[in-house]
Image (spheres, rainbow, N blue to C red):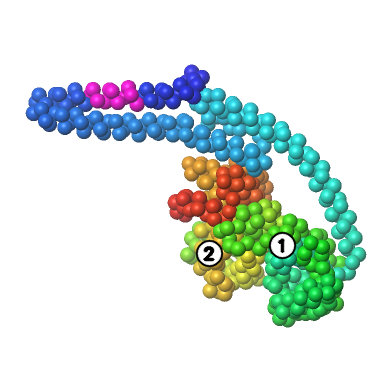
Amino acid sequence: MFTQLSLRLRIFLFFCLIALGGTVIVLGALYAGHGRALSTDLTNGFVFAAIVSVLGIVALSAGVWLLFDENVAKPIEKLSSDMRARAHAGVTGEVDTGAARYLGDLAPAASAVTSALTETNQSTIDLVATETQRLAAEKDRLTALLTEIPVAMILVNADDQIVLYDGQAAEVLSQQGVPRLNASLSDYFYENALSSARQTLAKTGKDVAFEAMGADGQQSYDMRMKPMDGGGYMLVVDDSHAEISPDASRPLTYDFDLLDQQAPASFEDTPIRALTYAVFDTETTGLLPHKDEIVQIGAVRVVNCKIVEGEMIDDLVDPGIPIPPASTKVHKVSDAMVVGKPGIDVAGRHFHNFAKGSVIVAHNAPFDMAFLHRHKGKMGVEWDHPILDTVLLSAVLFGASQTHTLDALCDRLGVTIPAALRHTALGDAFATAEVLVKMLPMCEARGLYTFGDILTETRRHGRLLEDLN
């Protein structure tokens, strides 16, 4: 019967409970104090009555607050976060009204609004899917044409950041590091030859042929720099020095929004959509960062709020110690699988290169980062990247009282982790990247537009990670 009452009446009943309970407590305290006054003295009786009244009212207020928090405040918080997820993160499905059963007509009204929004969004999604299919077909045709051209191509914006590379260019870039969109070209080639070619290009406006030295100082490449309308340029790498396989696949990796993107002044002032994120996860021999070791590192990159297809690492790591059977049962990495694999010094540097210029993202980041920090001397690197933790971001968006495991977050945001990939480094990294992509628009809806805004909010929930670890 109580579920049929209106929200206003329920809140009124909370105040009635405070008033009635307070009256009963005060009358009871006066009665007890009166008895004490008759048996001892009047002052002791009044003091006793006052103490009992104060303690009773405090206890009553705490009890009423717990009832209100559990049946009103928390359900409202959950309902609002569910609505934001459907409005800004593309989550579909009905709103869970079970937890909000005592909120009167608020839950059904919220459900009706989100259902209407879902129908509208579905129509938009269908239109976008049709257009995406058309663009994909055009991309396939372009890729097929590029296959006939025996050179590698890289598009670079006015800030010398990579906007596009094809499959053969990926082979060239991988000889000097990990191919990455939005990375500086000087991460792969010596700057002096590039700078000289850019100056000549600016003066003549015509193609410039030059020889570039790889960042490793060991390989040279014959290149041509071609100007592009609107700024930036194209690099064409001949295959005579690059040792490009003639049968190399030619998939395109690109984001043309990077053509107009300006280099950020600082991470804190950069809009969250303009940041590059390296989302990673590790599998380990155990749960003690001060003594256990990493056995697998998986990572993906997020650029302009999109997971970059093809930019990932999935490295098995020789931990140098036996992997306990209990750990293998969880992540399926056995001693036999890591025999002959790189140690943490090599694998750590590989991920450090992958994450260069990015915000590092992880679910419960202190745990994974503790392993990397412990071995930074072996790696010869400093882990000074900005860090974003999706546990804390979840607390900001959904409230600290909710569950913030990766499974709970995926369920809340409609992200599916295939069973075969759960508790694998790459599978969990992909899942974390997917929930990140869905949460960033929700952050903007909350007025959190820059990375500094998010840091300010997440720091308020730091105790969550202390309790988790």
Residue pictured at 60% horizontal, 57% vertical: 270
Dominant SS type (magenta):
helix
Tell me if residue 27 is in the magenta stretch.
Answer: yes
Report the residue marked by disc 2. 371
- Which residue appears farthest toward the bottom when viewing the image? 218
**Residue 346 falls left or right of residue 374:** right
Q: What residue is shown at x 45% (from left), y 33% (from top)?
A: 70
Quadrant of residue 98 in the image?
top right
The location of residue 357, given as percent across then percent down, is: 63, 65
Residue 125 location (% of width, % of height): 75, 40
Residue 405: x %, y % from top left: 55, 47
Q: What amino acid is at disc 1?
A: Leu
Q: Which residues are magenta?
A: 18-28
Looking at the image, is 216 positioned above or below residue 363?
below
- Amino acid at dot 2: Phe
Residue 128 place in picture, x, y as percent: 78, 43
Res 350 → quadrant: bottom right
Answer left or right for 445 relative to 256. Answer: left
Which residue shows up at 40% across the image and 26% down it? Answer: 14
Residue denoted by label 1: 181
Q: Is residue 142 within the magenta segment?
A: no
Judged left or right of residue 355, residue 231 is: right
Q: CA distance from mark 1 to mark 2?
A: 27 Å
**Circle 2 crowding by C-alpha within 10 Å: few under 14, some 14–19, many from 20:** many
> Of callouts 1 and 2, which one flags the residue occurring earlier in the amino acid sequence?
1
Against 96, is 148 above or below?
Answer: below
Q: Considering only vertical position in the picture, is 261 above or below 32? A: below
Q: In percent of the image, x 49 and y 20: which residue is there?
A: 5
User: Which residue occupies the foreground of this view, 198 or 313?
Assistant: 198
Which mark is nearer the camera, 1 or 2? 1
